[in-house]
Amino acid sequence: MLVVTDLVKRYGTVQALDGFSLNVAAGEIVGLVGHNGAGKTTFVEIVSGLIRPDSGHVTIDGRAPSATRGQVGVAPQHIALYPSVTVREHLELYGRLAGLRPVALRAAIDDLAGILRLSDIMDRRTGKLSGGQQRRTQAATALVHRPALLLLDEPTAGADLETRQAMLDVVKQRAGEGAAVVYTTHYLPELTELQATIAVAQNGRVIARGTYEELAKDLPGEVRVVLEDEEEIVLSTTEPTAALMELLGRLDRTISSVEVRHPSLDDLYNSLAVHHVS
Amino acid sequence: MSVDTALIDTPPRTGGTFDALYRIAAVARHNTIIRLRDPGQAISYIVMPMVLMLVLKPLYVRAVDGGATQVSTGLMVMFSVFAISLAGNAILSERTWRTWDRLRVSKAASAELLLGKILPIFVIMVVQQSVLLIYGVLVIGLPVPGAPHYVLLAIVIWAFALLSLGALLAAIVRSHGELSVICDVGALTISSLGGALVPLSIMPEWAQTTAYVSPGYWALTLMQAAVRGDLAGMLPSAGVLLVLGLLAGAFAARRLARGWGRGGLI
């Protein structure tokens, strides 16, 4: 569905993208992760057709971004809504711009209102909504026309639990229906819940790609056991669960608390950065 | 590496004329909603000239022949110039709200988006001018136009030129403050230099000579010819304003097609 090859983009002295390549198949969710400045948003803007790369190729379903408008749904990182306009009116605008006629539009809006938990606020102006409600509204505007490619740039940044769950539900639903999804985030648990493939961006290029298990298999996690006399045992291991079980079998003292920490995104970035540099 | 520029530059496949009209209507409907929820500016541009016409009429009638025509058409032109500000703010707000790029990602071409944004203001302007014209006839003593359709045509041409200028300004200014300064100073300059505020015949010679550079001059000439029912007299002014509107509109559409990037307002 989405084929991105060797994108290069420079803003003055800043190299935003430096050979960025990424393919996303129909029905696949790719979690694009990376520190700020890794090039995620520039990638989204180029694929959306908002800016042009200095070089490289982008095709969506075999065509250039400018030729596939309407097949792409974009929810940018920042909130971009009309404060004096209601949620319903937003969805009507974006649905009509995608060519939805009244009957189909009403059905699409009702469907989204349900899954994104917007039903109670459909006739409220977005300027009066909470941050989480605005996030869900913004996502709905990107989804209303059932695009074949979804670009969600940190859709849950600063969002509450309800918003986060609603967002994950709708992304899973759309991917299940065959949409290709690029989902940028800083929250690893979201990607594991989405069963997403992870692409790690750094310095304007994708430096690793795979499932979380594949990428993190050699990274040490941590087992922290606190005993009743406050003595602490810390193990660093690539198999934290197995190590914990083995430790529990050996210990004959009362345990106060146990903590198992699996490798985090930061661990992943740091490990990949070392490998990439070396 | 090469850029797939041929493909990137290809205009979007936007379907037929009906689809384009449907999208323009969607944007126009949306912007009408926004306008209706914040009508203060439009109302003030209708009420203020009504008050001024009433107050200034005795002065104009004593100063020049056809004073009632001068004060009515002059103030119609002067307060229509503020439509630049309406159009400019409507477009610049898309930058403040960061919504323009959301629209650019849609199937709509930038010209469609621009048309949809401007249409409600165009209607407001036509309504404003029509209300002022009727008020001028009923209250101020403006002669009843012999050919009302000429007057309507003049209003439409002038509105087109003004709104294109507003779009152009919105595309190049960096803030609402900048837009406000340019619109306020520009509106007064355009209208006063064009003879909308003070009749050209009693203005200094240098002002009479430079009046031609002001769109306000051409608008006033157009409006007065239309009120007289003088189609031939309308043509030069209509030509100048149409060319001005086309140039400004084309530049604005081209500039807005690129968006504003990530830069916020200053």
Image (cartoon, coloured by chain):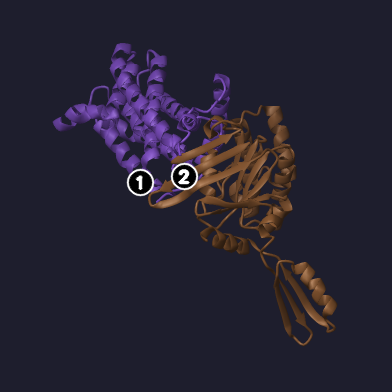
Chain colours: A brown, B purple
Residue at the spot x=30%, y=38% of the render? B186
Residue at the spot x=42%, y=31% of the render? B253
Left or right of B171? Residue A107 is: right
The one nearer the camera, B211 or A53, is: A53
Residue under mark 1: which chain is it in? B
> x%, y% of residue A101?
66, 27
Q: Quadrant of residue B218?
A: top left
Residue under mark 2: which chain is it in? A
Mark carried by residue B178: 1
Circle 2 residues within 10 Å: few <14, some 14–19, many ≥20: many
C-alpha separation, residue under disc 1 versus residue under disc 2: 35 Å
Residue at the spot x=28%, y=14% of the render? B233
Q: Nearer the viewer, mark 1 or mark 2?
A: 2
Q: Is residue A87 above or below residue B210?
A: below
Q: Amino acid at mark 1?
A: Glu
The one nearer the camera, B153 or A142, is: A142
Q: Amino acid at mark 2?
A: Val
Mark carried by residue A276: none
Name the residue that disc number 2 marks: A8
Q: Is residue A278 above or below residue A181?
A: below
The one nearer the camera, B107 or A128, is: B107
